Amino acid sequence: MINRPRLTVIGTGYLGATHAICMAVMGFDVIGVDVDPVKIEKLNSGEVPFFEPGLPELLTKALDSGRLRFTTDFAEAGAFGDVHFICVGTPQQRDSPAADLTYVDAAVTALAAHLTRRVLVVGKSTVPVGTAARLADLIRELAPAGDQVELAWNPEFLREGFAVDDTMKPDRMVFGVTSAWAEEQLRAAFEPVLDQGVPVKVTDLQTAELVKVAANSFLATKISYINAMAEICEVTGADVHDLAEALAYDERIGGKFLRPGLGFGGGCLPKDIRAFTHRAEELGVGQAVGFLREIDGINRRRRARTVDLVVELCDGDVAGKKVAALGAAFKPNSDDIRDAPALDVAATLAGMGAEVVVYDPAAMDNARRQFPHLGYGENALDAAQDADVVVLLTEWTEFREIDPAAMGAVTSQRRIVDGRHALDAGAWRDAGWEYRALGRP
Ligand code: UDX
């Protein structure tokens, strides 16, 4: 295609902001749209409203190129775009495991009113299977251009912390379409990505919706599988760390997402497996993914068991004990604390009467806002000052590099729970620490 389509990106959270910025850097004219004027103002002034390595530099580059701007005005976006990407969130509903589709419906409704010519709307949000077909009907009904407007589904697999790479050079692209024209538009919109040889799988809408939840369910299952093995190791004296390494040599199994520890959190895996289970039940095939409840259960037990280890190290009672909690983000290289195992453990210990002091390299502001009753340190050593026990909850590189002797010099007791299997157990024990990790003797 000679003329590059003009793009809009509706929703400027992790997914949308990254997508808008990367597409502009790759040479497209892009408008990012959000209902939150504060976010829009920040982005227009060159500030990324969340922590993502490499993204601030690319935002500056994209804004300087003149190809990217952000607005709250759907009319402007509707008039501008040839291809419109829907990138709003689908969090878990407050009182149900189901996904909350309020934002998707609102975004599509607001956009459709301004679609007066043949354009493509592309869903990227993670949605329950069947949503795309419903949205396609809604668009046809609401858009002045009626059935000239088509809907496609293009699930997004980006990982926080690697969002730029995952957007610029993904492992694969999935195009859920209902016409050859829609596929052509998508190929044009991703030309620079596809030119690098990234494989494309073209499917129908419902398969594209399912690929995303199937992938995340598989990853969650892999993590909970090794954590289930950790539970067995705990009662047999076996070492899950060695077990996982031995499994990983089998190419059919592979070592990725087989790291035992405190388990998964974040804005995707936990809510996606719950929403998937709920949707399957609605469809009358709940049994097919009944095991995902077990996956969720194993994952929750890891948090409880980590708390137990801390309590054990404190001779059975943490009340009045000082606990240094290293990590708050749901994983390293992120400031995201959504369903963060780290803060769950920290808050539970505080609830049991411990004096918990948290330190995280990036997530301090978010953590303070949501857990104002916890203590916060200036750095890892500061958090560990006079601690009765240290618990590592997010495996940031700077925590891996802590010198056990230096930390031992500031704590009151040399006791550590390595919730992420991130430390060299031998080195810590040699420095006089009582070292404990889930599934390790
Ligand atoms: C995930 C998917 O990887 C991504 O493809 C999808 O688009 C969104 O959800 P993300 O939420 O950014 O991405 O995090 P991910 O890197 O997948 O980690 C999820 C959680 O699993 C983290 O809490 C991490 O600490 C945990 N994890 C990961 C483990 O406990 N063990 C592992 O071996 C791997």
Image (cartoon, helix red, strand yellow):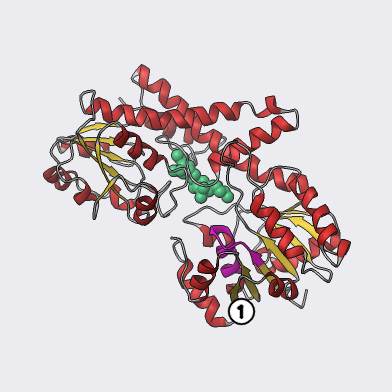
How many numbered marks appear? 1
Is 18 one of the magenta-colored residues? yes
Q: Is residue 45 visible?
A: yes
Query: Which quadrant would residue 167 be assigned to in this image?
Result: bottom right
Relative height, residue 107 to residue 32 (above, below) = above
The residue that appears at 54% across and 70% down in the rendered structure is 40
Relative height, residue 36 to residue 368 (above, below) = below
Determine whether, in the image, residue 230 is placed left or right of residue 355. right
The residue that appears at 85% across and 60% down in the rendered structure is 180
Q: Is residue 204 visible?
A: no
Determine whether, in the image, residue 234 is placed left or right of residue 187. left
Residue type at the position of mark 1: Arg
- Residue 46, image x, y percentages: 48, 74
Relative height, residue 119 to residue 384 (above, below) = below
- Start-end of magenta stretch: 9-23
Classed neighbour count for the residue bearing mark 1: other residues with Cα under 10 Å, few (<14), some (14–19), many (≥20): some
Please state which of residues 9 and 169 is positioned toward the viewer in this rendering.
Answer: 9
Q: Secondary structure at mark 1?
A: loop
The residue that appears at 54% across and 78% down in the rendered structure is 63
Q: Quadrant of the N terminus?
A: bottom right
Q: Quadrant of the C terminus?
A: top left
State the residue lying farthest toward the right: 147
- Residue 222, image x, y percentages: 53, 34
Main secondary structure type of the part rendered in magenta: helix
Please state which of residues 257 and 374 is positioned toward the viewer in this rendering.
Answer: 374
Relative height, residue 226 to residue 335 (above, below) = above
- Residue 245, image x, y percentages: 42, 34
Is 262 one of the magenta-colored residues? no
Determine whether, in the image, residue 32 is placed left or right of residue 407. right
The residue that appears at 40% across and 32% down in the rendered structure is 303
Q: Which residue is mark 1?
A: 67
